[in-house]
Amino acid sequence: MPDDHSKPPHATDGQGFATRVTHVSRPSVRSHGFVNHGVHRGSTVLYPSCAARGTINDASFDKHALTYGTAGGPTHFALEDAIAEVEGGTRCMIVGTGLAACAVPLLAYLKAGDHCLIPDTVYSPTRRLADGMMAGWGIETTYYDPTIDAEGLRALMRPNTKVLYTESPGSHTFELQDIDALAEVAHAAGAKVLMDNTWGIHHYQPFQHGVDVSIQALTKYVGGHSDVLLGSITVNNDEDFHAIAAAGRYMGHYASPDDCWLALRGLRTMAVRLKHQEQAGLEVARWFEGRPEVLRVLHPALPSHPQNALFKRDFTGACSLFGVVFQPRYSTAQIDAVVDGLKLFGIGASWGGFESLALPTTNYVSRTATSADRLGGPTVRFHIGLEDTADLIADIAAGLDTLPR
């Protein structure tokens, strides 16, 4: 039997986010007594009788049903329950990477002859999936301006449009999408609404805005320490869960229970990390706005962001990832040299960990429905970690001071 995932005696219904992520999906004291779940590794599941094994097909999508290792075990189930709580959904499937979390629902709802709408700002590996394997399978994709309104989206819908994919804010350029309005159009046409909610984490509650499937890279803030690769696919009803779980299992998707355990551990401190990193990110972003080398800062929580009103309407907070556009008088090579000289910022992909990152994005942004160079100057994406902001600002200032005036 799986471990008892019932809530501890101090139930969390109606309590704050920090309380919920501290207590959700922890083992009951009536189980084994330890605060945290153990790591359950296994492939074969043994049944007490042939008759019990005969129920395997009926139980294959039941919550916490043990059927075979690839369908998950107690460690997976604990993380799935916790992420469903974070996103306000009912069921969740954990997969091995954030990209897998993007791919599984797309392939669950699309087949040859279908049409998919994807924002032009989408995470680039998802674009490569659409332009490569999906196109090879006869699935057509149209990329759209992420700031499109309902009427504009309605004009792009076709009788065979089965999926509206969304990502708000968009990778690298941080445009927000009015998901409520777009979801209404998509649902009226019978299409599913998928959303990459990694930036929103829990600050954006997707199922309150018409999303059918919410995707997250748990590699980021949930793991929190840049040492796991995981993705989550969360839904709000059994029908969508069955579609997602079937597709994932058909393709053999699986996540390591050791990584699930690390993600559960990271989840317990996520609320305090998020709060600190949100404030630190805003502090550094506001400082950038005062620098003469900077053309503009791409942070939805700043009043200067063109969609700040939409941010305040839909989000309860922000994460620590934002972009900086430097003045066009500087070359990409000059900005790269500044990044190379930073002492407290790593140069690398991903984000959400305890360490700060700076990633030049000029010439790395693919756009087909909108202009890739409309930002106006060289760009760098910054992730603010847990370091003292005064030290981070001093590090960046020393780099910017090397630029010609």
Image: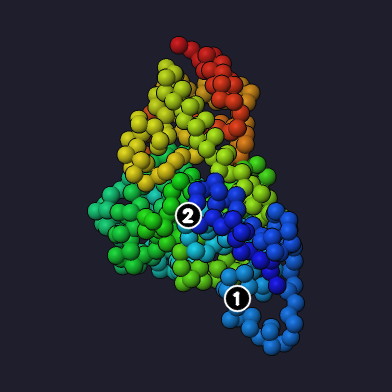
In this view, 360 is above or below 92: above
Q: Where is residue 308 in the image (x, y as percent from the top left)?
A: 34, 37
Say which mark, if any, is on residue 278: none
Q: Position of residue 205 (x, y in %)?
A: 43, 52
Say which mark, if any, is on residue 14: 2
Q: How far apart are marks 1 and 2 (CA)?
A: 31 Å
Point out the image quarter for the N terminus. bottom right
Instruction: Work out whether mark 1 precedes mark 2 in sequence or the reverse, and give the earlier one.
Output: 2
Q: Which residue lies furthest to the bottom in this view?
A: 51
Could you tell whether 236 is left or right of 306 in the image?
Answer: right
Give the crowd class for mark 2: few <14, some 14-19, many >=20 residues within 10 Å: few
SS state under label 2: loop
Could you tell whether 290 is left or right of 23 in the image?
Answer: left
Q: Position of residue 31 (x, y in %)?
A: 71, 64
Q: Which residue lies furthest to the top in this view?
A: 405
Disc count in the image?
2
In this view, 144 is above or below 32: above
Q: Position of residue 108 (x, y in %)?
A: 49, 67
Q: Which residue is drawn at 63% across and 64% down?
A: 5
Taking depth in this image into account, of 324 and 14 the one nearest to the observer is 14
Could you tell whether 296 is left or right of 238 in the image?
Answer: left
Taking depth in this image into account, of 338 and 267 the one nearest to the observer is 267
Q: Can you tell which quarter of the image residue 226 is in?
A: top right
Taking depth in this image into account, of 398 and 60 the one nearest to the observer is 60
Given the image, on which type of amino acid does mark 1 rest? Answer: Ser
Say which mark, if any, is on residue 60: 1
Residue 164 visible, this angle? no
Circles 1, 2 touching at the beta carbon (< 8 Å): no
SS state under label 1: loop
Given the image, on which type of amino acid does mark 2 rest? Answer: Gly
